[in-house]
Amino acid sequence: MSWKTKLSSSISVTRPSSPYCTPAMIKGWEEKILPRYATRHGALMPILHDVQHAYRHIPYAAMLEIAAFLKIAPSDVLDTVSFYEEYTTQPLGRCVIGICHTFACEICGHKAILDHVRKRLGIEPHETSQDGAFTLLTMECLGSCDTAPVALFNDVLHERLTIEKVDLLIDEVMSKRAGQAAHS
């Protein structure tokens, strides 16, 4: 296996007409996040969480803005985003389903649940449905081995999963989405 390299030094980042890091965000970072850290670089991860929460991903232009704000190299921001699985450069679905795939969940049948979700939503792990409704992730241990198999639906842990329970959770998300569309 060989490493595929990108000519990242020559990539241009398209900047939007208005910044991702809004004045309100920056004010919040200055008042609430920066004071908690000895160096500005220490605030990088909480700021990345804030941006990802706001936009459902971390755009490359936002990484440049964050680097400028923290007075660090843009490569430090990109290195952090690309190292941690919790960050993404592609928009996440409105419902993120994270299915644990470590040992206890594997023994307790996570594969059948994962295969069912893949088939039902028509997406593979780390993909988002075309309508932007769902993102499917496989995740490392969620710390609930005694209630395996488990999954997160938008950060809410669901234990002792069955295909029927997963279908009910997906149906609930879809019905909420249909209800919101009807009221729009």
Image: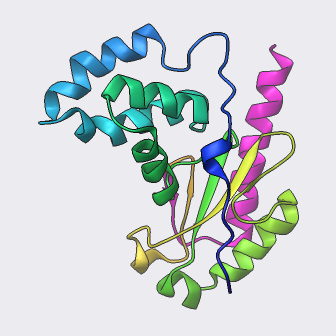
Is 15 situated above or below 131? Answer: above
Question: Residue 38's x, y, as percent?
Answer: 11, 36
Is residue 81 toward the left or the right of residue 56 in the image? Answer: left
- Count the marks: 0
Question: Residue 48's x, y, as percent?
Answer: 43, 37
Q: Indicate the quadrant where residue 89 lies.
A: top right
Question: Residue 143's x, y, as percent?
Answer: 38, 70
Per the image, is 177 magenta? yes
Is 62 situated above or below 160? Answer: above
Residue in the foreground of this view, choosing between 3 and 120: 3
Q: Which residues are magenta?
A: 156-184
Question: At x 23% / y 41%, what residue is drawn?
Answer: 42
Residue that extends furthest to the left in the rendered view of this protein: 38
Q: Indicate the quadrant where residue 62 lies.
A: top right
Residue in the foreground of this view, choosing between 5 and 23: 5
Is 135 situated above or below 12? Answer: below
Per the image, is 175 magenta? yes
Question: At x 60% / y 46%, what residue is drawn?
Answer: 9
Residue in the foreground of this view, choosing between 111 and 29: 29
Is residue 49 toward the left or the right of residue 85 in the image? Answer: left
Residue that extends furthest to the front in the rendered view of this protein: 10
Question: At x 33% / y 35%, what residue is drawn?
Answer: 72
Q: Quadrant of the N terminus?
A: bottom right
Question: Residue 33's x, y, as percent?
Answer: 25, 27
In this orientation, does residue 59 appear? Answer: no
Q: Of helix, strand and loop, which mostly describes the magenta segment?
A: helix
Q: Quadrant of the C terminus?
A: top right
In this orientation, does residue 125 appear? Answer: yes
Residue that extends furthest to the bottom in the rendered view of this protein: 107
Question: At x 57% / y 77%, what residue is drawn?
Answer: 101
Colour treatment of the image:
rainbow
